[in-house]
Image: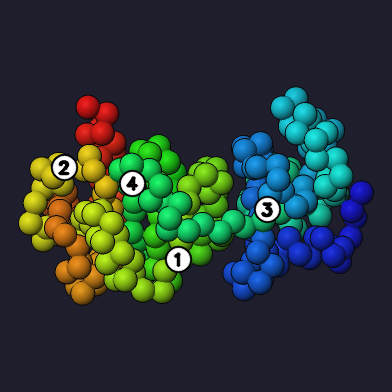
Amino acid sequence: MITSPSNKGVKEVIQLIQKAKARKERGLFVVEGVKMFLEAPEERIVRVYAAESFDKQMPQNCKEKFAMLADRLETVTDDIFRKMSDTKTPQGVLCVIKQREYSLEQMLAEKAPLLMLLEDIQDPGNLGTIFRAGEGAGVTGLLMSSRTVDIYNPKTIRSTMGSIYRIPFLYENDLAESIRKLQEKKIAVYAAHLQGAKIYDACTYRSGTAFLIGNEANGLREETAARADASVKIPMAGKVESLNAAVAASILLFEAARQRRK
């Protein structure tokens, strides 16, 4: 059992949680909680840490997975686990996971791809929620500008609720070039914009589609929005000017999903 905060593994977990640079250099990230542990692909798990109290009273489904990962399992005291955890009320289990690389080709493998293009999203919760909603709506991938918040930020990871394991994604230095590549593949790009020329549900999204969502405070850069095939808006009643980025993305994605079910 690990009892010291100076343990190499404990220090590594804390670094991976706190520093994006460490995550990038090592190609690793940390997930916490029972759900994230159970859904983690076994082949990508580097190490599992369980609090002493959790180890003594874990659910049966966790016991089965723990048995499979016995050679990668470490037990730590409850006090040490609290120091390792990024949450106020730790569930008692966390994992170090290998990052995965994806390609644009993977995202376009489906007959009618459904993509999200995100420009400078800054809130970790928004990004994680877009991943989760994207999986629910059948998205085939997410492309993000290099200024978008780190997907491996612990708050983002928690917000994905496991979708981080299953949704392909890429960070792009030149989002405009990515738009051009998609358009060459006959994928229509729709920019969500307050001055959108069309109401979002007046467009057809049954063929290859990509939705472009901008920064929470400033929206899309005008030069980025101008590259879209069309701009769409979500009409607002009352005095509300616009929706949260994750909510707007979810509405657009599920409209596409609704149309594709017909």
Comes first in the chain, label 3 or label 1: 3
CA neighbours of label 1 inside 10 A, class few (<14), some (14 to 19), many (20+):
some
Of residue 249 and residue 177, the one placed in the foreground of this image is: 177
Comes first in the chain, label 4 or label 2: 4
Comes first in the chain, label 3 or label 4: 3
Which tag is nearer the camera, tag 4 or tag 1?
A: 4
Three-letter amino acid code at disc 4? Answer: Pro
Q: Which mark is residue 204?
A: 2
Three-letter amino acid code at disc 3? Answer: Ile
Mark pair 4, 2: CA separation: 14 Å
- The residue pinned by badge 1 equals 171
Comes first in the chain, label 2 or label 1: 1
CA neighbours of label 4 inside 10 A, class few (<14), some (14 to 19), many (20+):
some
- The residue pinned by badge 3 equals 97
State the residue at coordinates (46%, 61%). 170
Comes first in the chain, label 4 or label 1: 4
Q: Which mark is residue 113?
A: 4
State the residue at coordinates (66%, 36%). 38
